[in-house]
Structure formats: structure tokens, C-alpha cells
Image (spheres, helix red, strand yellow):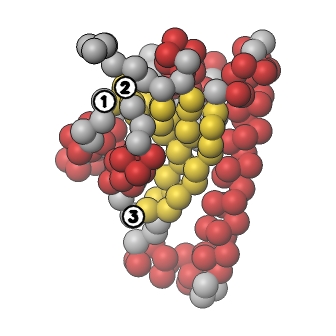
Amino acid sequence: MDLLPDFKKILYCTKIGPNSAYIYRHALALAEKFDGAITVLHVMETLTPDQEALIDGYIGPDSIHDVVEHEELDAAERMKKHLDTFCSRQGQAASCALRVDEIVVVESSSPAEEIVRQSVAMGVDVIVIGAHAQSSLLDALLGSTTQKVIKKSSIPVFVVQVPLGEQELTLVGI
């Protein structure tokens, strides 16, 4: 019986932002170290009814649903493109891209709960997620998505703190 964890199925959670490539490097390192596969998950936070009503007032009723549906389809394609660019820049285009099993884009009013739900449904061994260097007052009061995932997950969570100054080097999000 092996007492050390084996991270074969890695869930990489992304907002497709400027820090994504830095965080993805850690998911890729785990995948290479453990000969594992990565599933990329992007949770699009749904609008509250008040937010939706406000937007409907500007762009017309039901238009927001068309925008969100298009964004959801576009997000997976953008992630694939950013992943290819990232892998090319690393000089590992073939092996880097092969580590990604699947790209999943979902909508949820609670991103943390959705991440935990997806991780269980997918049977992953570890969740890789980023943390902000500075948190807002709202994060302090309500808790960030990363903090909520840590609290709610029974699966190990690998948190990547992005150092100050590093975000300028990772302008292409994955």
C-alpha cells in the first residue's frame, strides 16, 4: 500500500485572467510529476435577478441570455487558444497540450460550490486554484471563492498564490 498521494486527475480552475498562466504552470507541473491529466474548469458566475433586470433595461429583455450563451461557447474556445499559445511559449507544445483531457465551462450562482460539485463528479485527485495577493473588503466579509473551496472540499486543494509583479508576465489567460 502506497501512503503517498498520487495526483492522476487534476482539476485546474480558472477565471481566464492575467494570472491564469502562472497558476496553470503549477497544474502542469503536478501533471508531469505524477503523469496525470488536467481538466480545465471555468465557472461563469450567473447574474442575480437585480443585475439581470438592470442589464435588460439597457440591452433589452432576454438579450443577456444570448450574450451569456455566446460567452459560454466562446470561453472554451478562448481557453483552448490560450492553452496552445502558452504551450508554444513554453517550448512544449506537444506534451503540454496533451496533458489537458477536457475543457469544461459551466454557469453557477455559487462558483465555489460548483467547483466542489464538479471535482466530486469528475473524481479528481486534487484541485488547483489561484489566490489573490490582495483581497477586497467584500472578500474579507464574505470569503473568496478559493477560501470557500478549501472549506467545502474533501479533495486536496493546491492553492497558488501569485506573487506581486508576476501578473504582468502572464497577460495571456488560460
Q: Nearer the viewer, mark 3 or mark 1?
A: 1
Left or right of residue 54, residue 140 in this image = left
Say few, some or many: other residues with alpha carbon within 10 Å of mark 3 (under 14 / 14 to 19 / 20 or more).
few
Give the mark nearer the N terminus: 2 vs 3: 3
- Label disc, if present, on residue 46 of the rendered structure: none
Amino acid type at circle 1 is: Pro
* Amino acid bearing label 2: Phe
Relative vertical location of residue 99 with respect to residue 29 in this rendering, above or below? below
For the residues labelled 1 and 2, the Cα–Cα distance comes to: 7 Å
* Between discs 3 and 1, the one toward the N terminus: 3
The x and y percentages for residue 30 are 49, 18
In the rendered image, which residue does mark 1 sit on? 156
Q: Is residue 51 visible?
A: yes
Q: Position of residue 131 (x, y in %)?
A: 39, 30
> Closer to us: mark 2 or mark 3?
2
Question: Which of these two is toward me, 33 or 135?
Answer: 33
Q: Is residue 39 left or right of residue 159?
A: right
Extreme-bottom residue of the structure: 61
Identify the image quadrant of residue 31. top right
Q: Quadrant of the N terminus?
A: top left
Where does the image place residue 24, in percent across and percent down from the top left? 56, 26
| Three-letter code for the amino acid on which mark 3 is drawn | Ser
Query: Helix, strand, or loop for circle 3?
Result: loop
- Please say if the residues under marks 1 and 2 sit with CB atoms less than 8 Å apart: yes
Residue 155 position (above or below residue 50): above
At x 60%, y 76%, the residue is: 65
Task: Give the number of the disc on residue 109.
Answer: 3
Instruction: Identify the residue under disc 2.
Output: 158
The CA distance from mark 2 to mark 3 is 23 Å
